[in-house]
Image (cartoon, grey):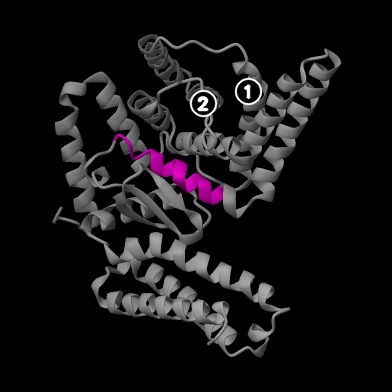
Amino acid sequence: MGSLLHTVLFDLKQRSSYFAEELERLRIALPPAVSQYREDMAKRLATVRRTIDRLLIDPGLKHPRLAQNYFYDYKRLSEFLYVFEQTAFVALGRFSTNDHLMSLIVKKVCEEIGFPYKSPICSATSTDYYFTYPSMDVIFVPGSEPFHLLATPDLYHELAHFVLQRDRPLWADSAQISIDEHYGRIIREKEQQNWPTAAIDDLFQHQSNWKTSWCSEIMSDLIATYWVGPAFGWENLRLCTNQSSDIFDGGLNHPADQARHDAIQLILLRMGLKDRAVEIDKKWHELLSLTGQQKPPNYDLTFPSQLLESLTDLVESNCRTQHLVAMTDFQGSGESNIGQLLNKAWEKFVSEPDKYADFEAEELRSLRSEFGIHSL
């Protein structure tokens, strides 16, 4: 009987072989729009399979003192196959006309915004709103999204996560310096004022939350707004109206909705879109009135406006450095794009919500015709 590690490697070998065979079977079935993606995933699987085969014949695998090192290799391979199965395999194995449309929309958006990487594919199979796996080049959206436009600005937020993850020194590392500087100053100040230890610990926790998750979400909102303008602000308002339970409370993975709204307002103002920012802010205050919620006492220490300003400065500068294309760069160009369509859709919805459905249906018919997709 072989060791546990030797045995479970055969499980990985069998699973990776199955995935590779399925991708080969899909070679003919998938449209050209995702053929390169399928090929890329097949190459990654081939690398995994070669690594597994090499480990299985490595005599060091049986050496007790070396086994832990090989276990780490096994865990990395196992994690890749797990993520692959949950993402790329689902997206390709269930690829439909709806996914094709959304993938072509993402591709066109990427061309318009100066997206610096290969366009990811899109899968309309999500059961948890919009989310992405940059490591697998795939964005997931709910199944009804190919038939609607109002939530589509969230694609820009997901694309922003690719930018943040793939050039960390430019984005995340610089942002964390701003976070540390801000909270370092505040904590020193409060310690000099003899604040209770528990209150100081809260500040350290806020600092940690900003560095681990809040910052990436806020910066993705800022980049998305830079790319698509007011449409993202309106969609954020829609999403918060539909799903928020507490406007001022931040969770482990997402900052408070109020902070996200404030950040969007800041970048809209920087872009010279004051009138649109005012319109969105007016509706936001209607939402606050409907909820009856009010800012808690320590909110400004948790989500400081000065830090939001610093992050907005960083995003605005980096977007220009990376030659990302702002929504305002298209104004007056006479060129139509997805971003303009989404802003037009939101303007129609806000001004004439009772007539919006017919407008949306016609715009989607035109979009499908442009992409050569007629069977939805």
Q: Which residue is mark 2?
A: 256
Q: Residue furthest right?
A: 192
CB-based contact (under 8 Å), mark 1 and mark 2 = yes
Q: Which residue is mark 1?
A: 302
- Please name the residue shown 18% across and 33% down the image: 359
- Say if the magenta span includes residue 291: no
Quadrant housing residue 72: bottom right
Q: Badge 2: few (under 14), some or many (20 or more) residues near its Cα, within 10 Å?
A: many
- Please name the residue shown 66% across and 26% down the image: 307
- Say if the magenta span includes residue 159: yes
The residue tagged with tag 1: helix, strand or loop?
Answer: helix
Q: Is 211 on the left or on the right of 196, as rendered?
A: left
**Disc 1/disc 2 C-alpha distance (Å):** 9 Å
Residue 272 appears at what percent x and percent y? Answer: 51, 24
Q: Who is closer to the viewer here, 116 or 304?
A: 304
Q: Amino acid at mark 1?
A: Thr
Q: Is residue 243 visible?
A: yes
For the record, the magenta segment spans 150-163
Mark 1 vs mark 2: which is more N-terminal?
2
Label of residue 33 in the image: none
Q: Badge 1: few (under 14), some or many (20 or more) residues near its Cα, within 10 Å?
A: many
Q: Is 123 on the left or on the right of 255, as rendered?
A: left
Q: Residue furthest front?
A: 1
